[in-house]
Image (spheres, rainbow, N blue to C red):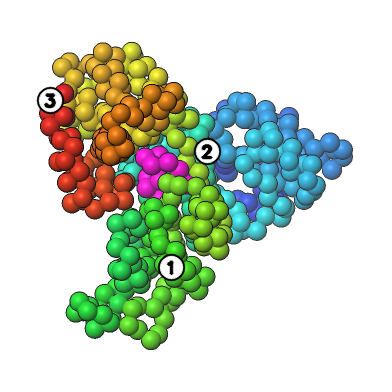
Amino acid sequence: MTSRVFNLLIIDDDPLVHQSIKLSLPDHWKAFSIQSEALISFDRFYHAAFVDMHLSAQQKIAAGPRIIENLLKVQPQTEVVAMSGDLSRELMEACLRVGAQKFLAKPIPGEELILTLEKIEALWALRSIEGSAQRSVRWVGTGAASMKIKKRIAELRGESQTVLLEGETGTGKEVVARLLHEQENERPFIAVNIASIPENLFESELFGHLKGAFTGADQNKVGLIEAANGGDLFLDEIEAMPLNQQVKLLRFLESGEVRRVGAKENIQVRTRVIVASNRPLQKMIADGEFREDLYFRISSQKIQLPPLRERHEDITSLATHFMESERPRRNKKFTDDGLAALADYNWPGNVRELKRLCEQLSLTSPLPLIRSEDVQPWLKAIDMSQQNPAQYQTIELTKGFNQLVQDYEALVIRTALKQSKDIEEASVLLKVSRSNLYKKIKDYKIDDEEKSS
């Protein structure tokens, strides 16, 4: 149980409504009742407010939307829930337009009330600096896009359906997956990168196998889905799953059952699956690379993560966070012009690229203050996503096709290395074996170039 106390404002003209809500409230919620619009005051902060639409039976026009609008002008962080027995579409939409987060039909069932309050608690935990500091992961940022993501995470508290996270590489999909997991009660969490599983071992890794099921199966093995029973399984880079294996995942999602390789009986498990994709799955469906029925199964609950170039207001807080969390601490911080230089960059590698740059700057900047002149040299590296298309019109064709292909391949490898923390991560990003990537780096003398630069 949480030790934090939450304040709930109830605005309704019916004393029975106040009484029923108070009887259903958890102990850590404190209710404050108001039965008339004239009595509304904001002498204390409210984490949430339940607002009735008609405070008098004589009212012809609902006062609720006006009350919600005025409340949010004074306390914009309050989570407002509209409630009414009048379920007209116009009234419900009016409430949403002025800022209500939800509309509940009266009378409100006790279970619905508790579930609503739990989601509000989850959102406040994500907002709170103190609450976030106690977590193993944090979503850093207070901009509009970040707040939208935090609200969506909180809305999914207690939900058991599969969740799809879509966004470019480095936008924070695993952070969101772990936040989705951490807001539940203590339960297992298993993360796996689909691209790292060899196709011939896919079924065994996900579903497990019995001893003797195939050559090399010298003991029984529990699959990842079964190991996450009662908790969450995070499947990253779902777009890398081969088509012939996608149907097997679909079968589990539809039935909730797994069958180990070599077994005759199915095992019932309760595992929530969180999947992530770097590529738009709907385009992959159109290209015949992803099953449409699997997409429909995994996308009923979806979170779209924006690239960092659409979260410019969060760059300052992200850079500061990365510098402060650097281990060992080097007691360095950005100057205003240093942060401004970061904010002017397009960040094709998203948050991951910003984190790697902060790590480099903490090591290389000569002063405790990281200035614009320390940042700029790192930002001048060629960025494929920002190249002028006209450059492709001046290709040195005299180099010959083979040399041009090698030059481009080397450029791709350098870009992947800049956006990855190590060779292992770069090989997963490029979908090549680590040994093959090492060979390419050696062939193109990329390590030597880095040392001489």
Q: Residue at x 80, y 47 (%)?
A: 88
| 54 to 238, vertically: above or below | above
Asked if residue 314 lies left or right of residue 159, the reply is: left
Foreground residue among 297 and 315: 297
Residue 170 within the magenta-colored segment of the rendering: yes
Residue where numbered disc 2 is placed: 148
Q: Distance of mark 1 from mark 2, alpha carbons?
A: 36 Å
Within 10 Å of the Cα at label 1, are there few (<14), some (14-19), or many (20+) other Cα atoms?
few
Q: Are marks 3 and 2 in contact (CB under 8 Å)?
A: no
| 150 to 291, vertically: above or below | above
Image spot of residue 367 (x, y percent): 17, 15
Residue where numbered disc 3 is placed: 452
Kind of residue sitting beneath label 2:
Lys
Kind of residue sitting beneath label 3:
Ser
Magenta stretch in the rendered image: 166-177
Q: Going from the N terminus, do you reach mark 3 or mark 2 first?
A: 2
